[in-house]
Image (cartoon, grey):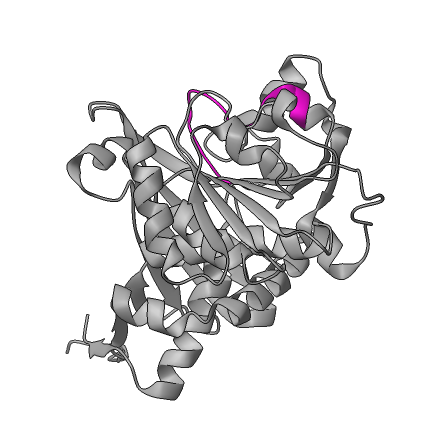
Amino acid sequence: MRIRGPVWHHPAVLVLSRREVEELLDPDELVDWVARAMAALSAGEVSMPPRIAADVADAVPPGFLAAMPAHVPSLGALTTKLVAVFPGNAGRGLETHQAVVAAFDPETGVPVALMDGASVTERRTAAGSALSTRLLAREDASVLAILGTGVQARAHARAVSRVRPIREVRIAGRDEGRARALAEELSGELEAEVVPAASFAEAMSGADVVCAATHSPEPVIRREWVEPGMHLTSVGFNTAGREVDGETVRDSLLVVESREQALAPLPAGSNDVVWAIRDGLIGPDHVHAEIGELVAGTRPGRESENQISLYKSMGVAVQDAAAAALVLSKARERGLGREVDV
């Protein structure tokens, strides 16, 4: 006689398209959910191993596929993001970051949702910078410089403009034509005046908040262009270089998402921070705070009007988890998505 085991039933997985994810990610609510996730991370209330990646050395230029799992109990989130970063896509008319996010039931581990991850990455990264601006920029900050012309540049202009009284946005990139095109596009939707700048230095001159979102291997934020009182954000990632020079890191109030990950080797860590340590400009203790500590009030933020603050983001998995949990909650409320048996 053959003994049969139990027949397990797996509920259908909710599949959400890019359009649906974008519709469900309210930008203001997302900043608050990211803040909750970052506070939980700094309090030691999450499980988030360092990012791992498989290199694709034969791509031109080389790319990689990274895995980013996280469990955030306070948000009921158990997720993993698979993100492929292929810089050569920029010349193919494709986005450099391609991704999916899978969500699981934190009580059973059963997969419950699969959603577009490129829009999650785009929105949660900009939300992190907006959160840092809310916590660190001067209250009267009104001039925003965007360094870059891609997906993250667009997202940062939109998100950061919502947390300070921005009256002027300057767009700068290595391609002046793309900078003009993005400025024209954003002029139609932002209340601020949006203008192209001829160079990164020109965009930064007199700015209050500077957001770098490039793939440049050479610094686009240089100390000679940084002025007292600026708040700087940097989200760019290039294994061969850095977005912020070491002198700027040295002279700034440095805030990161995770000390452990910022100081780790690639692909988890930040060349901007690690190379400044390598060059003897700072020590590991130069990291002033994790952004979650600022959210919780366990570390102070800006201490004077003239202080330079720098938020260096590497993108951490708890941010993806927060965004995915928000998407899933809203999708269930509104009945969006398609259930698929897998």
Location of residue 289 by image quarter: top right
Of residues 6 and 44, the one drawn nearer to the viewer in this rendering: 44
* Residue drawn where x is 53% and y is 27% of the image: 201
Q: Would residue 70 be seen by someone viewing this image from the given angle?
A: no
Magenta residues, dominant SS class: loop
Residue 50 coordinates in the image, percent (x, y):
51, 41
Q: On the rendered structure, is 229 left or right of 326? A: right
**Magenta segment includes 283:** no
Classify 266 as above or below 183: above
Residue at left offset 34%, top offset 58%: 119
**Is residue 206 toward the left or the right of residue 184 in the image?**
right
Within the magenta stretch, is there residue 247? Answer: yes
* In the foreground, 102 or 310: 310
- Tell whether 256 sits left or right of 325: right
Q: x%, y% of residue 175?
A: 32, 30
Q: Is residue 74 above or below residue 254?
A: below
Is residue 172 visible in the rendered image? The answer is yes
Q: Quadrant of the N terminus?
A: bottom left
Figure quadrant of the C terminus: bottom left
Magenta span: 235-248
Residue located at (67% from left, 50% from top)? 291
Depth check: 233 or 239 in front? 233
| Quarter of the figure with residue 260 | top right
The answer to whether 73 is drawn above or below residue 178 in the figure is: below
Residue 232 appears left or right of 253: left
Residue depicted at 74% across the width and 26% down the height: 251
Please count the marks in the image: 0
Instruction: Give the x, y percent position of residue 256.
Output: 64, 42
